[in-house]
Amino acid sequence: MKVQHDTTVILFSKNPTRRIPQTTLLLVAFTIIFTITSIFHPSLQKSIIRLSRSISQFSLSRNVDKVECDLFKGQWVRNRRGPYYTNETCGAIQEHQNCIKNGRPDIGFTKWRWQPDGCELEVFDPVIFLSLMRGKSLAFVGDSIARNHVQSLICLLSKVTHPIETSHNKEDQDSRRWEYKDYNFNISIFWSPYLVRTQKTDPKDVTRPFNLYLDEFDKSWTSQIKQFDYVIISAAQWFFRPSMYYVKRRLIGCLYCPQNITQYPAEFGYQFAFRTAFRAINTVKKYKGVTFLRTYAPSHFENGKWDKGGNCPRKRPYRRNKMALDDYNLKINNIQLREFETAEKTGRRKGLRFRLLNVTHVMLMRPDGHPNKYGHGPGEKEGLVNDCVHWCLPGPIDAWNDFLLEMVKRESHVARSSRRFTLH
Protein backbone atom coordinates (compact mmCIF):
# COMPACT_ATOMS: atom_id res chain seq x y z
CA MET A 1 0.00 0.00 0.00
CA LYS A 2 1.32 3.44 -0.84
CA VAL A 3 2.02 5.79 2.04
CA GLN A 4 1.67 9.52 1.60
CA HIS A 5 4.55 11.57 2.92
CA ASP A 6 4.73 15.20 3.96
CA THR A 7 5.72 17.69 1.31
CA THR A 8 9.46 18.17 1.74
CA VAL A 9 12.15 20.51 0.54
CA ILE A 10 15.81 19.86 -0.11
CA LEU A 11 18.41 21.89 1.78
CA PHE A 12 21.97 22.52 0.66
CA SER A 13 24.20 20.24 2.71
CA LYS A 14 26.92 17.68 2.38
CA ASN A 15 24.16 15.15 1.69
CA PRO A 16 22.00 16.67 -1.08
CA THR A 17 19.42 13.89 -0.80
CA ARG A 18 18.60 14.66 2.82
CA ARG A 19 15.07 16.00 3.19
CA ILE A 20 13.55 17.99 6.02
CA PRO A 21 9.76 18.24 6.48
CA GLN A 22 8.23 21.62 5.75
CA THR A 23 6.58 21.72 9.16
CA THR A 24 10.03 21.55 10.81
CA LEU A 25 11.23 24.45 8.67
CA LEU A 26 8.12 26.43 9.56
CA LEU A 27 8.84 25.97 13.26
CA VAL A 28 12.41 27.16 12.76
CA ALA A 29 11.17 30.15 10.80
CA PHE A 30 8.65 31.03 13.49
CA THR A 31 11.36 30.80 16.15
CA ILE A 32 13.35 33.44 14.26
CA ILE A 33 10.23 35.56 13.74
CA PHE A 34 9.35 35.25 17.41
CA THR A 35 12.79 36.45 18.46
CA ILE A 36 12.58 39.48 16.20
CA THR A 37 9.00 40.18 17.23
CA SER A 38 9.91 40.01 20.92
CA ILE A 39 12.29 42.89 20.36
CA PHE A 40 10.26 45.12 18.05
CA HIS A 41 6.59 44.10 18.54
CA PRO A 42 5.98 42.67 22.05
CA SER A 43 2.20 42.92 21.63
CA LEU A 44 2.22 40.19 18.97
CA GLN A 45 4.04 37.60 21.08
CA LYS A 46 0.92 35.72 22.22
CA SER A 47 -0.39 35.30 18.68
CA ILE A 48 2.97 34.02 17.47
CA ILE A 49 3.12 31.52 20.34
CA ARG A 50 -0.38 30.21 19.59
CA LEU A 51 0.41 29.80 15.91
CA SER A 52 3.70 28.03 16.69
CA ARG A 53 1.91 25.56 18.97
CA SER A 54 -0.74 24.92 16.32
CA ILE A 55 1.86 24.11 13.69
CA SER A 56 3.64 21.81 16.14
CA GLN A 57 0.42 19.92 16.83
CA PHE A 58 -0.39 19.74 13.14
CA SER A 59 3.07 18.33 12.46
CA LEU A 60 2.43 15.59 15.03
CA SER A 61 -0.94 14.76 13.49
CA ARG A 62 0.55 14.51 10.01
CA ASN A 63 3.08 11.99 11.32
CA VAL A 64 0.67 9.76 13.26
CA ASP A 65 0.20 7.38 10.35
CA LYS A 66 3.93 7.37 9.58
CA VAL A 67 5.04 5.55 12.69
CA GLU A 68 8.11 3.56 11.71
CA CYS A 69 6.72 0.44 13.37
CA ASP A 70 4.25 -1.70 11.45
CA LEU A 71 1.82 -2.94 14.10
CA PHE A 72 1.09 -6.09 12.11
CA LYS A 73 4.65 -7.23 11.55
CA GLY A 74 6.14 -9.04 14.51
CA GLN A 75 5.75 -12.21 16.55
CA TRP A 76 3.83 -13.78 19.41
CA VAL A 77 5.68 -13.65 22.74
CA ARG A 78 4.98 -15.12 26.15
CA ASN A 79 2.56 -13.23 28.38
CA ARG A 80 2.27 -14.65 31.86
CA ARG A 81 -0.30 -12.02 32.84
CA GLY A 82 -3.00 -13.35 30.54
CA PRO A 83 -5.84 -13.99 30.27
CA TYR A 84 -7.53 -10.71 31.21
CA TYR A 85 -10.97 -12.27 31.69
CA THR A 86 -12.37 -15.79 31.97
CA ASN A 87 -15.54 -17.62 31.06
CA GLU A 88 -16.63 -17.03 34.64
CA THR A 89 -16.09 -13.24 34.61
CA CYS A 90 -17.63 -12.58 31.18
CA GLY A 91 -21.13 -13.64 30.21
CA ALA A 92 -20.83 -12.59 26.56
CA ILE A 93 -19.00 -15.75 25.43
CA GLN A 94 -21.06 -18.02 23.21
CA GLU A 95 -20.98 -21.71 24.00
CA HIS A 96 -19.10 -22.70 20.86
CA GLN A 97 -16.23 -20.33 21.71
CA ASN A 98 -16.24 -21.18 25.42
CA CYS A 99 -13.34 -23.59 25.12
CA ILE A 100 -12.36 -23.76 28.79
CA LYS A 101 -15.94 -24.40 29.92
CA ASN A 102 -16.23 -27.11 27.27
CA GLY A 103 -13.29 -28.99 28.73
CA ARG A 104 -10.16 -27.74 27.00
CA PRO A 105 -7.47 -28.84 29.50
CA ASP A 106 -4.64 -26.49 28.49
CA ILE A 107 -4.75 -22.71 28.90
CA GLY A 108 -1.35 -22.04 27.32
CA PHE A 109 -3.09 -20.50 24.31
CA THR A 110 -4.17 -17.59 26.55
CA LYS A 111 -0.58 -16.81 27.60
CA TRP A 112 0.69 -15.02 24.50
CA ARG A 113 0.60 -11.43 23.28
CA TRP A 114 1.51 -9.85 19.95
CA GLN A 115 4.84 -7.99 19.85
CA PRO A 116 5.37 -5.76 16.79
CA ASP A 117 8.88 -5.25 15.48
CA GLY A 118 10.38 -1.98 16.61
CA CYS A 119 7.70 -0.75 19.01
CA GLU A 120 5.39 -1.77 21.82
CA LEU A 121 1.73 -2.63 21.44
CA GLU A 122 0.06 -2.01 24.77
CA VAL A 123 -2.33 -4.59 26.14
CA PHE A 124 -5.95 -3.45 25.89
CA ASP A 125 -6.86 -0.96 28.61
CA PRO A 126 -10.65 -0.75 29.03
CA VAL A 127 -10.52 2.57 30.88
CA ILE A 128 -8.57 4.26 28.10
CA PHE A 129 -10.76 2.71 25.41
CA LEU A 130 -14.00 3.84 27.05
CA SER A 131 -12.59 7.31 27.62
CA LEU A 132 -11.71 7.63 23.94
CA MET A 133 -15.11 6.27 22.94
CA ARG A 134 -17.13 8.56 25.19
CA GLY A 135 -20.05 9.93 23.18
CA LYS A 136 -19.20 7.77 20.16
CA SER A 137 -20.52 4.68 18.39
CA LEU A 138 -18.90 1.60 16.88
CA ALA A 139 -20.38 -0.83 14.34
CA PHE A 140 -19.20 -4.25 13.19
CA VAL A 141 -20.40 -5.53 9.81
CA GLY A 142 -19.78 -9.12 8.79
CA ASP A 143 -20.23 -12.74 9.80
CA SER A 144 -19.76 -14.88 12.93
CA ILE A 145 -16.07 -13.96 13.13
CA ALA A 146 -17.14 -10.32 13.44
CA ARG A 147 -19.46 -11.45 16.25
CA ASN A 148 -16.49 -13.30 17.79
CA HIS A 149 -14.61 -9.97 17.74
CA VAL A 150 -17.48 -8.07 19.35
CA GLN A 151 -17.73 -10.61 22.16
CA SER A 152 -14.00 -10.33 22.81
CA LEU A 153 -14.36 -6.55 23.10
CA ILE A 154 -17.31 -6.79 25.48
CA CYS A 155 -15.38 -9.28 27.63
CA LEU A 156 -12.33 -7.01 27.81
CA LEU A 157 -14.55 -4.06 28.77
CA SER A 158 -16.25 -6.18 31.45
CA LYS A 159 -13.26 -5.53 33.71
CA VAL A 160 -14.66 -1.99 34.10
CA THR A 161 -18.35 -2.03 33.22
CA HIS A 162 -21.13 -4.01 31.57
CA PRO A 163 -23.42 -2.82 28.76
CA ILE A 164 -27.19 -2.83 28.52
CA GLU A 165 -28.49 -4.61 25.44
CA THR A 166 -30.82 -2.36 23.48
CA SER A 167 -31.40 -4.52 20.40
CA HIS A 168 -34.77 -4.03 18.73
CA ASN A 169 -35.20 -7.79 18.56
CA LYS A 170 -33.32 -9.55 21.33
CA GLU A 171 -34.24 -12.94 19.86
CA ASP A 172 -32.12 -12.09 16.83
CA GLN A 173 -28.62 -13.26 17.77
CA ASP A 174 -27.09 -11.97 14.57
CA SER A 175 -27.74 -8.21 14.59
CA ARG A 176 -27.52 -6.66 18.06
CA ARG A 177 -26.84 -3.41 19.92
CA TRP A 178 -25.32 -2.64 23.34
CA GLU A 179 -25.06 0.64 25.23
CA TYR A 180 -22.54 1.76 27.82
CA LYS A 181 -24.72 4.37 29.48
CA ASP A 182 -22.03 5.89 31.70
CA TYR A 183 -19.96 6.69 28.63
CA ASN A 184 -22.73 7.43 26.13
CA PHE A 185 -21.05 4.81 23.94
CA ASN A 186 -22.72 2.06 21.93
CA ILE A 187 -21.66 -1.00 19.95
CA SER A 188 -23.69 -2.61 17.16
CA ILE A 189 -23.20 -5.63 14.98
CA PHE A 190 -24.90 -6.06 11.61
CA TRP A 191 -25.14 -9.58 10.26
CA SER A 192 -23.98 -9.43 6.64
CA PRO A 193 -21.76 -12.42 5.82
CA TYR A 194 -21.64 -11.49 2.12
CA LEU A 195 -21.64 -7.68 2.61
CA VAL A 196 -24.03 -7.33 -0.35
CA ARG A 197 -27.74 -8.03 -0.78
CA THR A 198 -28.50 -11.73 -0.49
CA GLN A 199 -31.50 -14.02 -0.59
CA LYS A 200 -31.95 -17.60 0.55
CA THR A 201 -32.93 -20.03 -2.19
CA ASP A 202 -34.73 -22.01 0.51
CA PRO A 203 -36.03 -19.81 3.37
CA LYS A 204 -35.97 -22.75 5.80
CA ASP A 205 -32.56 -24.17 4.91
CA VAL A 206 -29.39 -22.10 5.33
CA THR A 207 -27.30 -24.95 3.93
CA ARG A 208 -28.76 -24.36 0.48
CA PRO A 209 -27.02 -21.89 -1.90
CA PHE A 210 -27.68 -18.19 -1.40
CA ASN A 211 -28.48 -15.77 -4.20
CA LEU A 212 -25.82 -13.04 -4.15
CA TYR A 213 -26.70 -9.76 -5.84
CA LEU A 214 -23.09 -8.75 -6.23
CA ASP A 215 -23.68 -5.18 -7.40
CA GLU A 216 -26.40 -4.28 -4.88
CA PHE A 217 -25.95 -2.79 -1.41
CA ASP A 218 -27.07 -4.65 1.69
CA LYS A 219 -29.28 -1.90 3.07
CA SER A 220 -29.54 -3.60 6.46
CA TRP A 221 -26.21 -1.92 7.24
CA THR A 222 -25.53 0.61 4.47
CA SER A 223 -28.68 2.55 5.43
CA GLN A 224 -27.49 2.88 9.04
CA ILE A 225 -23.75 3.47 9.08
CA LYS A 226 -24.02 7.25 8.76
CA GLN A 227 -24.76 7.37 12.51
CA PHE A 228 -21.49 5.64 13.47
CA ASP A 229 -18.10 7.11 14.27
CA TYR A 230 -16.24 3.85 13.58
CA VAL A 231 -17.23 0.97 11.29
CA ILE A 232 -15.33 -2.33 11.05
CA ILE A 233 -16.17 -4.50 8.06
CA SER A 234 -15.02 -8.07 7.48
CA ALA A 235 -16.11 -11.16 5.59
CA ALA A 236 -14.64 -14.41 4.34
CA GLN A 237 -15.84 -17.90 5.15
CA TRP A 238 -19.32 -17.70 3.65
CA PHE A 239 -17.88 -16.96 0.22
CA PHE A 240 -16.45 -20.48 0.07
CA ARG A 241 -19.85 -22.17 0.02
CA PRO A 242 -22.29 -22.72 -2.92
CA SER A 243 -23.68 -19.44 -4.24
CA MET A 244 -25.66 -18.10 -7.18
CA TYR A 245 -24.23 -14.90 -8.67
CA TYR A 246 -26.49 -12.10 -9.92
CA VAL A 247 -25.50 -8.82 -11.58
CA LYS A 248 -28.15 -6.30 -12.62
CA ARG A 249 -30.73 -8.79 -11.31
CA ARG A 250 -29.62 -11.35 -13.91
CA LEU A 251 -28.10 -14.73 -13.06
CA ILE A 252 -24.60 -14.72 -14.53
CA GLY A 253 -23.08 -17.81 -12.92
CA CYS A 254 -22.46 -19.65 -9.69
CA LEU A 255 -20.00 -21.27 -7.30
CA TYR A 256 -20.24 -25.04 -6.66
CA CYS A 257 -23.67 -25.43 -8.23
CA PRO A 258 -24.99 -28.40 -10.22
CA GLN A 259 -26.76 -26.29 -12.86
CA ASN A 260 -25.38 -26.05 -16.36
CA ILE A 261 -24.33 -22.39 -16.08
CA THR A 262 -21.04 -20.54 -15.88
CA GLN A 263 -18.96 -21.67 -12.93
CA TYR A 264 -16.89 -18.97 -11.20
CA PRO A 265 -14.19 -19.37 -8.54
CA ALA A 266 -14.87 -18.02 -5.04
CA GLU A 267 -12.47 -15.13 -5.66
CA PHE A 268 -14.86 -13.71 -8.28
CA GLY A 269 -17.74 -13.21 -5.87
CA TYR A 270 -15.40 -12.14 -3.09
CA GLN A 271 -13.80 -9.32 -5.07
CA PHE A 272 -17.11 -8.16 -6.51
CA ALA A 273 -18.75 -8.04 -3.08
CA PHE A 274 -15.94 -6.08 -1.45
CA ARG A 275 -15.91 -3.61 -4.32
CA THR A 276 -19.64 -3.07 -3.89
CA ALA A 277 -19.37 -2.74 -0.10
CA PHE A 278 -16.65 -0.11 -0.37
CA ARG A 279 -18.65 1.71 -3.06
CA ALA A 280 -21.57 1.80 -0.64
CA ILE A 281 -19.43 3.34 2.10
CA ASN A 282 -18.05 5.95 -0.27
CA THR A 283 -21.51 6.97 -1.44
CA VAL A 284 -23.49 6.99 1.83
CA LYS A 285 -24.62 10.56 2.43
CA LYS A 286 -23.58 12.20 5.71
CA TYR A 287 -21.26 9.35 6.69
CA LYS A 288 -18.13 10.84 8.27
CA GLY A 289 -16.86 7.89 10.28
CA VAL A 290 -13.59 5.97 10.14
CA THR A 291 -13.86 2.69 8.23
CA PHE A 292 -11.65 -0.23 9.23
CA LEU A 293 -11.17 -3.27 7.06
CA ARG A 294 -10.40 -6.22 9.30
CA THR A 295 -8.64 -8.63 6.98
CA TYR A 296 -9.23 -12.34 6.61
CA ALA A 297 -8.28 -14.60 9.53
CA PRO A 298 -7.24 -18.00 8.09
CA SER A 299 -8.58 -21.29 9.41
CA HIS A 300 -6.13 -24.04 10.46
CA PHE A 301 -7.55 -27.44 9.50
CA GLU A 302 -5.08 -30.30 9.51
CA ASN A 303 -5.45 -34.06 8.91
CA GLY A 304 -8.39 -33.57 6.57
CA LYS A 305 -10.90 -31.02 5.31
CA TRP A 306 -13.34 -29.31 7.65
CA ASP A 307 -16.09 -31.86 6.94
CA LYS A 308 -13.76 -34.87 6.61
CA GLY A 309 -12.31 -35.11 10.09
CA GLY A 310 -9.98 -32.12 9.88
CA ASN A 311 -8.83 -30.70 13.21
CA CYS A 312 -6.46 -28.13 14.76
CA PRO A 313 -4.72 -29.81 17.71
CA ARG A 314 -1.65 -27.56 18.06
CA LYS A 315 -0.97 -25.99 21.45
CA ARG A 316 1.36 -23.09 20.71
CA PRO A 317 1.86 -20.41 18.03
CA TYR A 318 4.04 -20.88 15.00
CA ARG A 319 7.39 -19.15 15.18
CA ARG A 320 8.16 -16.28 12.88
CA ASN A 321 8.52 -17.21 9.20
CA LYS A 322 7.47 -20.83 9.81
CA MET A 323 4.15 -20.38 8.01
CA ALA A 324 3.15 -18.60 4.81
CA LEU A 325 -0.23 -18.13 3.19
CA ASP A 326 -0.93 -20.83 0.65
CA ASP A 327 -1.85 -19.84 -2.88
CA TYR A 328 -5.61 -19.69 -2.29
CA ASN A 329 -5.47 -17.73 0.97
CA LEU A 330 -2.91 -15.38 -0.56
CA LYS A 331 -5.33 -14.61 -3.39
CA ILE A 332 -8.10 -13.83 -0.89
CA ASN A 333 -5.84 -11.57 1.14
CA ASN A 334 -4.57 -9.75 -1.96
CA ILE A 335 -8.13 -9.11 -3.12
CA GLN A 336 -8.89 -7.39 0.16
CA LEU A 337 -5.76 -5.27 0.02
CA ARG A 338 -6.34 -4.19 -3.58
CA GLU A 339 -9.99 -3.26 -3.03
CA PHE A 340 -9.10 -1.47 0.18
CA GLU A 341 -6.44 0.62 -1.53
CA THR A 342 -8.82 1.62 -4.32
CA ALA A 343 -11.57 2.51 -1.84
CA GLU A 344 -9.16 4.45 0.37
CA LYS A 345 -8.04 6.62 -2.55
CA THR A 346 -11.63 7.35 -3.53
CA GLY A 347 -12.65 8.05 0.05
CA ARG A 348 -9.70 10.34 0.70
CA ARG A 349 -10.87 12.66 -2.06
CA LYS A 350 -14.21 12.88 -0.26
CA GLY A 351 -12.68 13.47 3.15
CA LEU A 352 -13.35 9.92 4.38
CA ARG A 353 -10.85 7.86 6.34
CA PHE A 354 -10.09 4.17 5.72
CA ARG A 355 -7.78 2.17 7.94
CA LEU A 356 -6.41 -1.38 7.64
CA LEU A 357 -6.76 -3.78 10.57
CA ASN A 358 -4.38 -6.21 8.93
CA VAL A 359 -4.62 -9.36 11.06
CA THR A 360 -4.16 -12.02 8.36
CA HIS A 361 -0.49 -12.87 8.94
CA VAL A 362 -0.83 -12.26 12.67
CA MET A 363 -3.54 -14.92 12.96
CA LEU A 364 -1.91 -17.31 10.52
CA MET A 365 0.61 -17.91 13.30
CA ARG A 366 -2.05 -18.99 15.85
CA PRO A 367 -3.21 -22.54 15.00
CA ASP A 368 -3.61 -23.15 18.73
CA GLY A 369 -6.38 -20.61 19.31
CA HIS A 370 -9.41 -22.36 17.80
CA PRO A 371 -12.10 -24.29 19.70
CA ASN A 372 -11.32 -27.48 17.72
CA LYS A 373 -13.28 -30.24 19.51
CA TYR A 374 -13.96 -27.95 22.47
CA GLY A 375 -16.51 -25.92 20.54
CA HIS A 376 -19.32 -27.91 22.17
CA GLY A 377 -20.00 -29.71 25.41
CA PRO A 378 -18.88 -33.29 26.14
CA GLY A 379 -22.32 -34.73 25.43
CA GLU A 380 -22.78 -32.92 22.13
CA LYS A 381 -19.80 -34.12 20.11
CA GLU A 382 -21.36 -36.84 18.02
CA GLY A 383 -21.91 -35.70 14.44
CA LEU A 384 -20.35 -32.25 14.97
CA VAL A 385 -17.28 -31.08 13.08
CA ASN A 386 -14.21 -29.61 14.72
CA ASP A 387 -14.14 -25.81 14.73
CA CYS A 388 -10.86 -24.46 13.33
CA VAL A 389 -12.46 -21.26 12.04
CA HIS A 390 -13.69 -19.37 15.11
CA TRP A 391 -11.53 -18.40 18.10
CA CYS A 392 -11.61 -19.37 21.75
CA LEU A 393 -12.53 -16.68 24.25
CA PRO A 394 -10.33 -15.68 25.96
CA GLY A 395 -7.74 -16.27 23.25
CA PRO A 396 -5.66 -14.84 20.40
CA ILE A 397 -8.56 -12.81 19.02
CA ASP A 398 -8.28 -10.49 22.02
CA ALA A 399 -5.21 -9.02 20.30
CA TRP A 400 -7.55 -7.55 17.68
CA ASN A 401 -8.75 -5.15 20.34
CA ASP A 402 -5.17 -4.28 21.27
CA PHE A 403 -4.80 -3.21 17.63
CA LEU A 404 -8.16 -1.44 17.65
CA LEU A 405 -7.32 0.62 20.73
CA GLU A 406 -3.97 1.71 19.30
CA MET A 407 -5.58 2.73 16.02
CA VAL A 408 -8.38 4.62 17.76
CA LYS A 409 -5.73 6.47 19.79
CA ARG A 410 -4.10 7.57 16.56
CA GLU A 411 -7.39 8.69 15.05
CA SER A 412 -8.24 10.64 18.20
CA HIS A 413 -4.84 12.32 18.10
CA VAL A 414 -5.33 13.32 14.47
CA ALA A 415 -8.77 14.76 15.19
CA ARG A 416 -7.58 16.62 18.30
CA SER A 417 -4.52 18.04 16.57
CA SER A 418 -6.54 19.14 13.54
CA ARG A 419 -8.96 21.04 15.76
CA ARG A 420 -6.05 22.87 17.38
CA PHE A 421 -4.71 24.03 14.02
CA THR A 422 -6.69 27.25 14.09
CA LEU A 423 -5.29 30.72 13.58
CA HIS A 424 -6.44 33.27 16.13
Image (tube, helix red, strand yellow):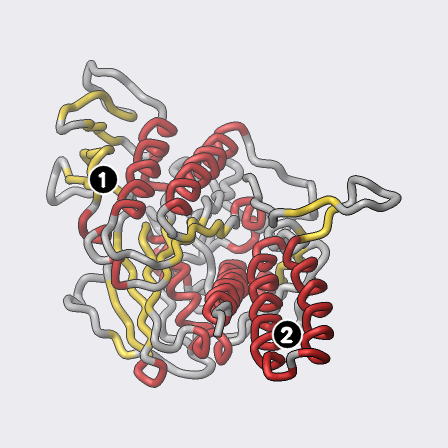
For numbered disc 1, what is the local secondary structure?
Answer: loop
Dividing the picture into quarters, in which one does residue 197 lie? top left
Amino acid type, label 2: Arg
Residue farthest toward the front in the current orientation of the protein = 40
* Coordinates of residue 109 in the picture (x, y in percent): 58, 61
Residue farthest toward the right in the current orientation of the protein = 14
Quadrant for the N terminus, please. Answer: top right
Amino acid type, label 1: Thr
Q: Is residue 289 visible?
A: yes
* Coordinates of residue 19 in the picture (x, y in percent): 73, 47
Q: Is residue 398 visible?
A: no
Q: CA distance from mark 1 to mark 2?
A: 42 Å
Does residue 265 sit above or below 176 in this rendering? Answer: above
Residue receiving disc 2? 81
Neighbourhood count class around disc 1 (C-alpha, 10 Å): few under 14, some 14–19, many 20 upward:
few
Residue farthest toward the left in the current orientation of the protein = 203
Residue at 33% across, 58% down? 288
For numbered disc 2, what is the local secondary structure?
Answer: loop
Residue receiving disc 1? 207
Does residue 213 sit above or below 64 in this rendering? Answer: above
Q: Is residue 132 left or right of residue 62?
A: left
